[in-house]
Amino acid sequence: MNFALLMLILLLVTGAIWLLDHLVFRRRRDKGAKEPWWIEYPKSFFPIILIVFLLRSFLVEPFKIPSGSMIPTLLVGDFILVNKFTYGIRLPVANKKIMDINLPQRGEVMVFRYPENPTLDYIKRVVGVPGDRVEYRNKRLTVNNQLVPVDKDDDYQYVDGGLSFVNSARFWETLGTHRHSIIINPEAPALQLAGVKQFPQRENCVYNEQEFNCLVPPGNYFMMGDNRDSSSDSRYWGFVPEQNIVGKAFLVWWNFSELKRIGNRIN
């Protein structure tokens, strides 16, 4: 059961008990009699659950980074905050948009429901918006026939799954108005063709061993991880429909292993 649904159920149960006590049970109790525990506890928790539910549903929701697909922007163990309203107001649980505010822009880091299993939340960077032509050739990204600018930085080393060190080339990439860091493993192939799945509107993409070329369909987005050679993303499982959007990641608020990351903005 997903957390939002669990919170909604708890809110409805505690709210119903609070309302019934206000309308019925309180009038039947003797004056000065103590509330039974099954009324006292739900009434105490109801306002807390209501506040948390409203905050998580419409304003800000916390997430934990479970994988290294967004290294070096996000590290395994980062706890991040996600803006839930910047891409529009959505109904809790159903995730149906009821009010437009902003559309996702190239370069933004977005949390979304994984198209193959909407119970899972993924986080990647927006590379292509509806109508964009996205190409990846020789490990260089092109959007609408324009090569995305990159600047070489110092090499980057990280531990992969706690087992081995990975040496990668690090670059600063400018995508839209966002300048962010990406890493590329020079020893990895440009594309793992065996990992490409049969996803909806797969006919919009052309693949070979060295590159891919995709036209992003209306109402969809093309997502990629900043750890380009260690990311399961739109290259392999396809486009992210607009209805799967959760929100925009904007802040690292905690990391037990690296306290200096607390307060880092997500670019």
Image: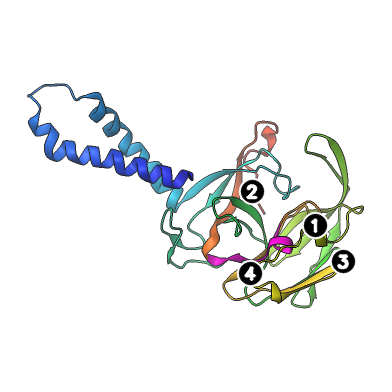
Q: Is residue 131 visible?
A: yes
Kindly state the secondary structure of the residue where label 1 is placed.
strand
Q: Residue 106: image x %, image y %?
A: 66, 66
Q: Earlier in the sequence, mark 4 or mark 3?
A: 4
Cβ atoms under marks 2 and 4 closer than 8 Å = no
Q: Is residue 245 left or right of residue 4?
A: right
| Residue 80 vs residue 22, the one in the foreground | 22
Task: Please give the residue where the numbered disc 4 appears in the rendered image.
Answer: 200
Q: Which residue is mark 3?
A: 209
**Image label count:** 4
Nearest-to-viewer mark from 1 and 4: 4
Residue wearing tag 1:
172
Dot 2 alpha-carbon crowd within 10 angstroms: few under 14, some 14 to 19, many 20 or more: some
Amino acid type at image mark 1: Trp
Residues under labels 1 and 2: Cα distance?
Answer: 16 Å
Q: Position of residue 256 (x, y in %)?
A: 65, 31
Helix, strand or loop at label 3? It is: loop
| Gap in angstroms between the C-alphas marked 3 and 1 | 25 Å
Q: Residue at x 25, y 28 (%)?
A: 38
Q: Residues within 10 Å of mark 1 (few under 14, many from 20)?
A: some
- The label shown at residue 265 is 2
**Cα gap from disc 1 to disc 4, whole angstroms:** 32 Å
Amino acid under disc 2:
Arg
**Closer to viewer: mark 2 or mark 3:** 3
Q: Earlier in the sequence, mark 2 or mark 3?
A: 3
Secondary structure at badge 2 equals loop
